[in-house]
Amino acid sequence: MKFPARPCWFLLFLILLFSGHSFSQTPAEDKLLAQISKETNDTAKIKLMVLYVMVFGQRETSQKWYDEIHSLSVKNHYRPGLIYHRYYEMLKLFDQGKYDEAISGIKGCIDALDSLGVVQPFAYPLYHIQHVYFLAGKPLDMFRFYTDKIAYYRNHGPIENTAACYLGLGQYYRALADNDKAIGYFMRALEVYKSFDPIGVIDAKLNIGGSYMDWGNLDKAEEFQKSTLKDLIRSNEVANTDVYDALGDIYVQKHDYKEAMYYYFEGKRCYKLPLLKALNYINIASVHLHLGHNDSALFYLERAEKIRQQEKLGPRFSYNYIDIDFYFYKYYAATGNKKQAVSHLKAALESASLSKNIPLLLTYTKEFHSFLLKHGDSLQSLRYLLQYNTIQDSLDASKTQARIATFEVEQQAQQKGNEIEQLKFQKAAQRRNYLAGGFIIILILLAFFSRLRYKRKRDKEQLTSDFKNQLARAETKALRAQMNPHFIFNSLNSINSFVMDQQHELASEYLIKFSKLIRLILDNSRSETISIEKELEALKLYVLLESARFDNKFKCVYHIAAEVNTNSIMIPPMLLQPFVENAIWHGLMQKEGEGTIVIELAMKNEELLMITIEDDGIGREKAAELKSKSATHKSHGLKVTSQRIEMMNKLNSSGAQVTIEDLKDEQGRASGTRVELVIPI
């Protein structure tokens, strides 16, 4: 006879919470420990330590981990770390049998994490509280808690936390043998976990597979457990779950003992936890009993018993619906040893009673009735039959009460949901009213401003020279705004080219310089004028970026006369860059071999600054010819800059001017371009 297994993560929780037995570390655990040792940021380290102690922590080491979490959290004023430390204190209260106090404290920890908007993945307090409720014998309180929390997370977030609530509700309905509802909640948990927690995905799938097996749908159970196995193999964590045994259980139910034995032996090969090893041995023994291989069954039962004695597991087998004493009973019953059979069946019944496992109590009392009746002890058989009926009646009454209470809670939750929807509807109606009122106000304002605009149009005489100056200044700002996006677009294309060419280090260096340049551009663009020093700083960064992009195809040389005070002379920002850009793209890029740009700054007289930008490229005539064939780089820099200079002259009545000269060599061939800017200071 085979019994459905609870999810292995529940088993792991019991081991971590109530035992001090060590087991081999897994690759994921080793990786996490390495991350913790290398982390230098205290807050990040706390988060990693919390993750480790929630998923992998053991009784003998948990205190040390939580003490360090508390110490670092106090030092860095990190509230979640302090809350997790308090959660551990609540677990210790539970260990002492103070169930109500522990549950109240854990709920307080969860509420505190909710107030901070903390997402709680698998194995965190929001998930673990379901087991604390179950072991305290308060499943209905757990149902109410999770129902309220789902409503809270739907309205306030984080929505990810509904996953643990759905799992808890699924476990509740599974305990009531309402597998349809249980699977529905597990499916909801699975969908939420898919968005943020792969371990939660595995746990949800295990529960779905187990529920389908409880329900008798073995094909669906097999589908989900095999999907879970693939996930675990992919993450190299199959040693931490009894998924192989779960698959073996399915094939036992199908009476396919060969396939069942295959999966049990796969589990035997990879399981590391002593408890999982022992359970695996029992499963193998059960198949041998089905096949009548009694000696082989005894061999594996004795190996499981050895682990139970060494690890002092006691009645913990009962939590997984599998008790070694029951299978010893099956062995001795099969071999005709009545005395040993009765002894082990009594031990199994006592274990089930200690663990308050009602399904096992029913199974063992019924088995006692059948065994004693078969061996002619009708009086004792009747006693166990009466005991079975009493337990069954009590269980049925409890389930009925639980279903009634559940229905009441669901109705209350539905009523609350309706009230919330009604409030949302009222708020939406208010919002519509506000929008309608706002629309009317906007219409009134539009009418007012239209009238004002009409009045201004009629009164042209009021347009003064001050207004014209303001208009010219606004036009200057608009022209400058056109240049910055154009330049940023070119730089982003450069970064994209490096990334696409897999030149990651060069892309990183380019990106650092680019971010510094963008910062300079943003700072400079806030002012009408900046110093030549700042203009040259931005220009040099730009040239470096373009040169790096084109494998240093060109270089830029700067000559600044001694009489030019670069810190005190002010010019409009981004004035020189378009000319340099034009020299690069239309002069040097088409040239064979390396090119050079020479930038000279000198005083023409005491009031005029002359800036010369000269390149040895292909010249404007050849560039125009090539551009007409393929305009891969469209630059409006010269035109925009000329317009800016016109705006400067209009606004300040200055004599700024720009001239462009085509250079020729001794044979009359184009040898470059010279741009001269004369700016009043």
Image (spheres, grey):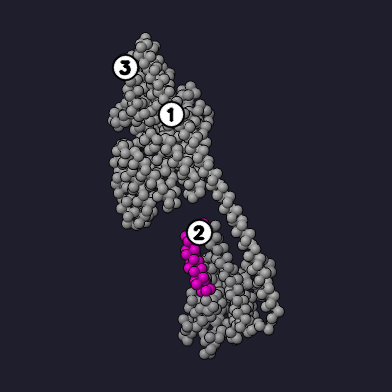
Q: Is residue 315 visible?
A: yes
Q: Amino acid at mark 3?
A: Gln
Element type at marker 3? Answer: helix
Q: Nearer the viewer, residue 98 or 35?
A: 98
Element type at marker 1? Answer: helix
Residue 121: quarter of image: top left
- Mark 1 vs mark 3: give the one in front: 1
**Which residue is labeled 1 in the image?**
398
**Which residue is labeled 3 in the image?**
340
507 drawn magenta: yes
Magenta residues, dominant SS class: helix
Q: Residue 22 in the image: state x and y as whole percent.
A: 31, 38
Q: Is residue 539 left or right of residue 663?
A: left
Q: Is residue 247 visible?
A: no
Mark-to-mark CA distance, 2 and 3: 75 Å
Q: Residue 537 in the image: state x and y as whole percent.
A: 48, 74
Instruction: Indicate which disc, 2 or 3, sits on the residue closer to the N terminus.
Output: 3
Which residue lies at the image location 55% right of the left edge and 60% below the top edge? 496
- Mark 2 vs mark 3: give the one in front: 3
**Which residue is labeled 2 in the image?**
503
